[in-house]
Amino acid sequence: MNINLVPMPNEIYTDYKLFFRKNILENSIVEYDSKYSAEEYSITIDEKGAKIKCSGKAGENFAYQTLKQLEFSYSGNIPYLTINDKPAFSYRGFMIDCARHFFSVSNLKKMIDCAALFKLNKFHWHLVDDQGWRMEIKKYPLLTEKGSVRAYSNFGRDYDSNPYEGFYTQNQMKDIVEYCRKKSIDVIPEIEIPGHVSACLHAYPNLSCTDKEIPVRTHAGIFRDILCAGKEEVYEFLFNVLEEMSSIFPCEYVHIGGDEAPKDRWEECPHCSKKMESLNLMNYEQLQGYMTNRIYGYLQKKGKKAIAWNESLRGKNLEKGITVQNWREKNDECSIRASEGGKIIVSDFFHYYLDYPLGMTPLKKTYMYEPIPSALAENMKKNIIGVEAPIWTEFINDIDKMSMMSFPRLAAVAETGWTYKKNKDYKGFTHRLSYVIRMIEKTGLKYTDASQWDPGFFKSVVQVIKFAYNMYNKETLKSRKD
Ligand code: ACM
Ligand code: ZN
């Protein structure tokens, strides 16, 4: 069945014999029925228009996105049809890094509109990193007064000598949460613990192992100064920040980071050594596990769940209840976790990182990627709760580039998240997408043209070389591990 919908509904019937000739959005009715699951919906289109059935707002929103796509492609000529639809995975996310570059509320809303179009339901908001702290926390005003400003920007070949700043007020973040809620999208804020925190340490140097003055970073990289795991004041700080975050973000999940945290400072820190000894921990990875577990314990008391990047598994002491986001697992650590009952979100960097050029990750490669490890036992497959595509922004400093890089690959990830594997097919997808993707223009954003979706060998080589060349500059190379 080829009908221009992305993601492809899981059951659809039409014989293309009879057509509805008026605007379908203006001729639809909704009937709530509690037998439907939260995100499930059905639509029948006949001479009366569209009849949607669902159990509540989420199903209604997804049905509405389906009707919007039908109206766009077949306006005045919509075939009578029946759709019975529900998603393959409960977690279907996109992540935007607003720390390396800042994106206005209005631009974020445009990205959210486009993500909603493809029935994504989680906006993972990367709000803090080495190059900027962008979330207002009233108890710690220096986080934004000092931590949201960097002296200049030196990302790859893009050098800008001007100071760079920006942060979201609590009201602005609440506005985004409300905007997303209306589209059945949960906002998951991320606070990085213990690494990627230079901006935080610039504001409050007492939170590091050394108490030394640290700049908000001006270039990409992995930095050695991280939150001290030995000082009790660090935990108090984190609990207070999380407390304020809970008043802004109602989502049950909070992302607590955990990626790329070098242990150099911890190895030389008397506070960290004392903590290790008092807890009988075997190594510094276990200390990270302890820290993550303690934050998780705090969140649990608030009725929340935690997500952490896969490096948090390295100490082998991570609490079972923490959901792990797999961007770059080592030694099948995430597959093993899933086989033992742990929940996993799949964000394999080589397939799902949208900031990589299409030459490196062509659309087909993203689309065909199978998030459930083949070796996982049938009864453990449910532990892969979904997929998420991150957009890191070291090398993306405006919304046009962000949207060009995100679309169409985000639509491919969305189809994997929604459509059962047995109903997926790449050729049909690109055909349907070539119509639907034009809807992005209506939001004022850009997308990459179909001629570039699978660039072929020579164009790919050129793109990859350009991408790699652009990543490095003298500052980055000199201080890969400041
Ligand atoms: C990551 O890309 N460092 C999660
Ligand atoms: Zn320390």
Image (cartoon, grey):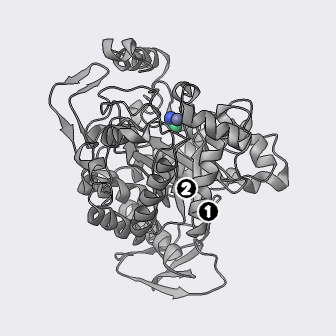
Which kind of residue does numbered mark 1 sit on? Pro
Labelled pair 1, 2 in contact (Cβ < 8 Å): yes
* Image position of 174 with respect to 391: above or below: below
Residue at 61% x, 65% y is 300
> Mark 2 falls on what kind of element?
strand
- Residue 438 is situated, as x and y percent measured from the top left of the image, at 34, 50
Q: Quadrant of the C terminus?
A: top left
Q: x%, y% of residue 174? A: 33, 67
Mark 1 vs mark 2: give the one in front.
Answer: 2
Q: Residue at x 26, y 59 (%)?
A: 169
Q: Which residue is mark 1?
A: 87
Furthest residue in direction left, as rendered: 162
Quadrant of the rendered image containing residue 399: top left
The correct choice, above or below, for 191 with respect to 131 in the image is below
Q: Quadrant of residue 244?
A: bottom left
- Pick whichever, 372 or 416, lies toward us: 372
Residue 208 lies, in percent from the top left, at 44, 36
Q: Amino acid under label 2? A: Arg
Front in this rendered view, residue 452 or 370: 370
Q: Report the disc number at residue 92.
A: 2
- Quarter the N terminus occupies: bottom right
- Residue 330 vertical position relative to residue 140 in the rendered view, above or below: above
Label 1 sits on a secondary structure element that is: loop
> Would you say residue 4 is visible in this rendering?
no
- The crowding category of the residue bearing disc 2, from other C-alpha atoms within 10 Å (few below 14, some 14 to 19, many at least 20), is many
Task: Name the quadrant containing residue 407.
Answer: top left
Q: Is residue 293 above or below residue 154?
A: below
| Observer-nearest of 463 and 472 | 472
438 with respect to 387 (left or right) = left
